């Protein structure tokens, strides 16, 4: 608001300027920008004796002030300013980027010396010492384009407003009675939530809002209100930390406006701060207006013409400056995106724009981009030739599409890219296509190598199964013949000679043992090839069938069998019966004959699986052999001591693994053994 003394002063100044003919000179209204740049700070020496290092916390997702590069390192205007501060003062500075809410919590807990990028609020003013502001930021309402009537805080009533955790916007809305907010860790998370329909409106600082909307191709999906308010960036220290405040302030006094502008222009294209004070600008504008008024009183028609020309000139200049700033911001954000991006004509494929990442990926300098068309980036041979490329682009022009494409580098080598295509309208040249590309060559090569390995393993496994089945099948007939003829030999000559009878018995027993080996090998080889599909199987019923098969063995051993409640599982019922039969039969075979054998079969929940336990009080297994018992043909006892062929447990393990489960054992010699295995419940069946 202009005061009366300032208005009077402006009138006097205007009159003097007219009289002296010095209207073009602005030097009388204050120090010129050049003079201001030459002002030497009163205190240019930084006393660092007590401060050897600074830790600075910042928001790590506020482009172009702060954001992370491809390697995850923090970069932007603020980190560069602190790097220059460190170079001027000689004090090492560590800039730590994180979510804004977390940065405030850690700073308040005393884990850092300085918090940067903070807006002033009354609540913060009670605990922080604020620096002078160094950049002004507009804060707007970003809302879904389907809404209307959103223009200020009052129009947000009834909506759940997306805000960034720790943002000054929360206090601003609360002071105006808006307390229905949903907190998110970053502005990008807010944009994503709006895209997914979680929220319709959000309070967001304009620079990161522009960045993420353009990066995600959502500039047409959302709209922004006029600024709710403008905040200003400060660095702060905790109250009572005057030593740090004075050192930091003195260090920034050593940085000239030109150096600050150079850093900002590097990231934004145009300085965010002005060398002319707003009050001076207002005085100049008011003085100019009053001068025009005097001229109008003297020469009405000349004054009117000049005022109209001046107003139109200011309007065009303001529009041109706005376009220049917007284009610079867009170009900075466009080139800062890590994905390769091109914008091209749908019909001809002519490339209109390409960002830095695309030029690096394909090896083309900036001056060659206008002469390129999209087929120039393709491998060149069908189905990646010129015609196929243009046909694909036209076919996908009506909706977003993601595809994999074989691309060609400027030097001729080819590589795979994942292309995300979407239709955009940027200017009055009509609809165009935006393509975001990522190099996926390593991913494709890894997938191809994995496919080849799986195919080779599948062939090898199939060949082994066929070999085992054929070998064991072909062995059965000779063994049957051997047993039959040995038994005939015993019938004919056994009664004449006891020694012949004994030898024949050895032959028959050996042949039968070999038959059991062959049968076990056949079963082992057919687990995957002959097994049926998985159905809903009552494991209690399968257990009962298995116990029926073992009834004679249970009766002969005098064992006591305990069974618990059994669940319904997804399984091959025949193989589940075989699994129970083998594990219980194993417990009977290796029982401790000095006491009554007790075998317990139970189940329990284990996450999203069912776990089964088969426990016994048998002779147990030494820990040194626990990892060997599931190896096919591996036996810990001789056949004469405990009959067997060494296939049963290996077969159990293969059955469980076919069902997607795990089989393991726990044992203590002289105490007993517990076998555990897991099976899945039927689909969509909670456990």
Image: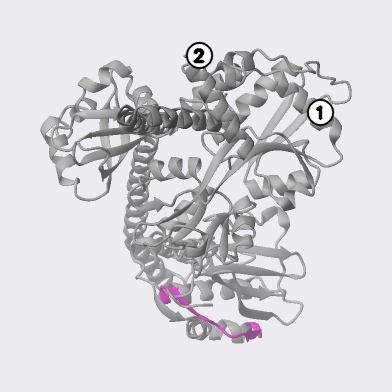
Can residue 210 be seen in this snapshot?
yes
Magenta span includes 214: no
- The location of residue 58, given as percent across then percent down, is 65, 38
- The location of residue 478, given as percent across then percent down, is 34, 60
Which residues fall within the magenta stretch?
557-573
Q: Which mark is residue 622?
A: none
Magenta span includes 558: yes
Q: Residue at x 84, y 26 (%)?
A: 51
Image quarter hosting the C terminus: bottom right
Q: Which residue is mark 1?
A: 246
Image quarter hosting the N terminus: top right
- The location of residue 118, given as percent across then percent down, is 66, 42
Q: Residue at x 15, y 46 (%)?
A: 395
448 left or right of 47?
Answer: left
140 left or right of 339?
Answer: right
Compute the Cα span from label 1 to label 2. Answer: 46 Å
Q: Residue at x 29, y 38 (%)?
A: 435
Q: Which mark is residue 20?
A: 2
**Please, is residue 568 above or below residue 352 in the view?**
below
**Please, is residue 348 above or below residue 397 in the view?**
above
The mark lying in front, picked from 1 and 2, is 2
**Please, is residue 112 above or below residue 648 in the view?**
above
Can residue 280 be seen in this snapshot?
no
Q: Residues within 10 Å of mark 1 (few under 14, many from 20)?
A: few
- The location of residue 429, given as percent across then percent down, is 19, 36
130 left or right of 256?
Answer: right
Please tell me whether mark 2 sits on a helix, a strand or a loop. helix
């Amino acid at each position: 608001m202009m005061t009366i003394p300032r208005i009077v002063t402006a009138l006097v100044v205007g009159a003097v300027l007219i009289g002296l003919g010095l209207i073009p000179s602005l030097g009388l209204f204050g120090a010129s920008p050049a003079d201001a740049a030459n002002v030497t700070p009163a205190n240019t020496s930084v006393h660092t004796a007590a401060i050897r290092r600074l830790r600075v916390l910042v928001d790590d997702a506020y482009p172009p002030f702060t954001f992370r590069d491809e390697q995850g390192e923090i970069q932007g205007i603020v980190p560069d300013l602190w790097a220059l501060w460190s170079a001027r003062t000689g004090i090492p500075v560590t800039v730590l980027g994180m979510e804004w809410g977390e940065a405030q919590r850690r700073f308040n807990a005393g884990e850092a010396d300085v918090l940067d990028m903070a807006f002033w609020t009354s609540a913060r003013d009670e605990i922080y010492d604020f620096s002078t502001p160094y950049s002004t930021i507009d804060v707007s309402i970003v809302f879904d384009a389907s809404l209307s009537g959103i223009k200020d805080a009052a129009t947000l009533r009834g909506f759940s407003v997306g805000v960034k955790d720790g943002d000054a916007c929360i206090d601003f809305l609360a002071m105006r009675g808006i307390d229905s907010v949903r907190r998110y860790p970053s502005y990008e998370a807010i944009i994503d939530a709006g895209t997914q329909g979680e929220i319709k409106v959000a309070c967001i600082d304009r620079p990161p809002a522009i960045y993420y909307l353009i990066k995600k191709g959502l500039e047409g999906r959302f709209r922004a209100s006029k600024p709710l308010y403008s905040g200003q960036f400060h660095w702060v220290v905790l109250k009572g930390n005057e030593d740090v405040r004075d050192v930091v302030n003195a260090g920034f006094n050593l940085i000239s406006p030109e150096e600050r502008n150079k850093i900002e222009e590097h990231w934004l294209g145009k300085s965010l701060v002005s060398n002319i004070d707003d009050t001076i600008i207002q005085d100049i504008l008011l003085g100019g207006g009053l001068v025009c008024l005097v001229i109008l009183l003297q020469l009405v028609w000349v004054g009117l013409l000049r005022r109209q020309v001046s107003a139109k000139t200011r309007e065009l200049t303001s529009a041109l400056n706005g376009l220049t700033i917007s284009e610079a911001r867009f170009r900075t954000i466009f080139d800062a995106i890590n994905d390769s991006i091109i914008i091209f004509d749908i019909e001809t494929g002519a490339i209109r724009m390409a960002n830095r990442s695309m030029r690096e990926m394909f090896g083309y300098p900036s001056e060659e981009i206008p002469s390129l068309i999209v087929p120039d980036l393709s491998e060149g041979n069908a189905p990646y030739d010129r015609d196929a490329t243009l046909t694909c682009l036209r076919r996908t022009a009506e909706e977003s599409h993601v595809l994999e494409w074989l691309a060609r580098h400027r030097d001729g080598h080819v590589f795979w890219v994942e292309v995300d295509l979407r239709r955009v309208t940027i200017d009055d040249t009509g609809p165009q296509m935006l393509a975001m590309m990522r190099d996926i060559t390593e991913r494709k090569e890894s997938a191809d190598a994995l496919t080849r390995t799986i195919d080779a393993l599948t062939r090898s496994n199939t060949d082994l199964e066929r070999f085992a089945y054929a070998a064991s099948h072909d062995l059965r007939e000779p063994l049957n013949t051997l047993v039959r003829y040995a038994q005939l030999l015993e019938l004919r000559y056994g009664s004449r000679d006891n020694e012949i009878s004994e030898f024949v018995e050895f032959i028959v027993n050996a042949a039968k043992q070999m038959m059991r080996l062959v049968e076990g090998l056949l079963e082992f080889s057919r687990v995957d090839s002959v097994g049926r599909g998985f159905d809903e199987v009552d494991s209690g019923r399968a257990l009962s069938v298995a116990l029926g098969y073992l009834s004679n063995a249970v009766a002969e051993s005098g064992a006591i069998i305990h069974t618990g409640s059994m669940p319904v599982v997804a399984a091959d019922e025949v193989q589940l019966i075989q699994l129970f039969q083998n594990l219980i039969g194993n417990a009977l075979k290796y029982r401790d004959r000095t006491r009554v054998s007790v075998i317990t079969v139970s189940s329990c929940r284990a996450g999203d699986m069912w776990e089964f336990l088969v426990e016994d009080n048998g002779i147990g297994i030494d820990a040194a052999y626990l990892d060997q018992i599931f190896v096919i043909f591996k036996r810990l006892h001789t056949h004469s001591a405990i009959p067997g062929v060494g296939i049963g447990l290996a077969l159990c393990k293969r059955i469980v693994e076919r069902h997607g489960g795990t089989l393991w054992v726990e044992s203590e010699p002289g105490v007993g053994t517990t076998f555990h295995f897991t099976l899945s419940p039927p689909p969509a069946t909670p456990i």
